[in-house]
Image: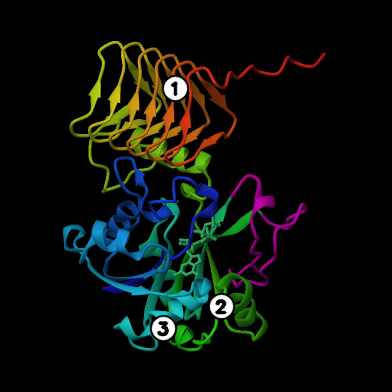
Amino acid sequence: MTEAVLLVGGKGTRLRPLTVNTPKPMLPTAGVPFLHHVLSKARAAGIDHVVLATSYRPEVFRDGIGDGSSLGLRVDYVTEEVPMGTGGGIRNVLDRLESGPEDPVVILNGDVLSGHDLAAQVAAHQASGAEVTLHLSEVEDPRAFGCVPTDDTGRVTAFLEKTPTPVTNRINAGCYVFKRRVIDAIPADRPVSVERETFPGLVASGALVLGHVDPAYWLDLGTPAAYVRGSRDLVLGILASPALPGPVGESLVLEGAHVAGTAVLSCGTTVGARATVGAGSSVEGSVLLDDAVVGAGSTVRDSVVGRGARVGAGVVLDGVVVGDGAEVGDGNELAHGARVWVDARLPAYAIRFTPDEPSA
Ligand code: GTP
């Protein structure tokens, strides 16, 4: 059995206002907290002990995951009073780890949805004797990511910052296997970034850092559009997860929800517990969180409606986030990444969206 550290201390600023009440790794995704998908995947790969490196809103993790027994895991918690960065967060859990100095410890970012073969990554790490083995994903457009070139043997040769002209489409996918003694060597008294400090330092010192390429499904849930997409892909079965609380299909409707017979749910929509969708509405590729309300004759596309938020009748939402407890009055039309803040009130017919005329 291997143990894992989950980095879940970030504030998730890009996902605000969804992360005002709920840390990003605990946002309901296809009907369960996102972390359930990550933890059940770790369990399936042979991990039995997980330490959560928390900082922002640690109580939400303890309430939602407890001792981990319902997921077949032993889960421990460590909380940084001041965020210590990704490396500092890993170093901070050292005294909870049970592995020996040469043993592999898996490190997972708490906001990555990945179909890669974790057991194969650990096996590659063990076979090579590397200090650290990184999962490298291949993306179509690597300009938004730091990229990680390797030589023919898979040895990482550099960690390159974001650039308009990347030398490879292979990027750091946020899942690492460390020899435990590499964690011992991370400075304990200050914030450290593994991406900016630990990994480049290891490469510069000549240590073997291995890149393990696995081109499986991979998504960083950092933005609202990515969060909506991740949830949709799980509901549709594009990525399988042992934690999905129902059969795959066009939609997932949780307990106590009420969907009018003339409403249409499609493209991997989730309707949260006790949420309601009114007559004649269409909800497409969207996430309605628990107790959300969508009135009659509304269209909700690629959007999130927060916990207990109320969307009136005849509303159009397209690529929009409505925060927990907010109200969008009848007849509003919002699009293009608009975000309605937690508990905000938008009067009826306050905003009408008119698409730009196509330019001649
Ligand atoms: P943004 O604020 O939107 O960039 O999100 P974030 O705060 O989650 O940052 P980022 O996406 O870069 O973080 C990657 C992963 O590392 C996430 O799973 C975070 O929860 C985690 N993380 C980031 N900073 C820290 C930290 O200081 N301590 C711990 N324990 N985890 C962190």
Circle 3: element type: helix
Instruction: Give the percent coordinates (x, y) of residue 244.
Output: 27, 43
Q: Amino acid at mark 1?
A: Gly
**Is tag 2's residue or tag 3's residue first in the polypeptide sequence?**
3
Residue ID for mark 3? 180
Give the distance between the C-alpha atoms of the residues marked 2 and 3, in whole angstroms: 17 Å
Instruction: Please name the residue shown 42% across and 75% down the image.
Output: 80
- Magenta region: 139-168
Instruction: Please name the residue shown 58% across and 68% down the image.
Output: 154
Instruction: Residue 238: tell me if it is visible.
Output: no
Residue ID for mark 1? 329
Looking at the image, which residue sits at the far right?
360
Q: Nearer the viewer, residue 32 or 341?
A: 341
Residue ID for mark 2? 192
Give the distance between the C-alpha atoms of the residues marked 1 and 3, in whole angstroms: 54 Å
- Vertically, is 119 above or below 205? above
Circle 1: element type: loop
Label 1, ligand 1: CB separation under 8 Å: no
Q: Nearer the viewer, mark 2 or mark 1?
A: 1
Instruction: Give the percent coordinates (x, y) of residue 15.
Output: 50, 48
Q: Are marks 2 and 1 in contact (CB under 8 Å)?
A: no
Q: Please tell me the numbered disc located at residue 8.
A: none
Q: Nearer the viewer, residue 176 or 74?
A: 74
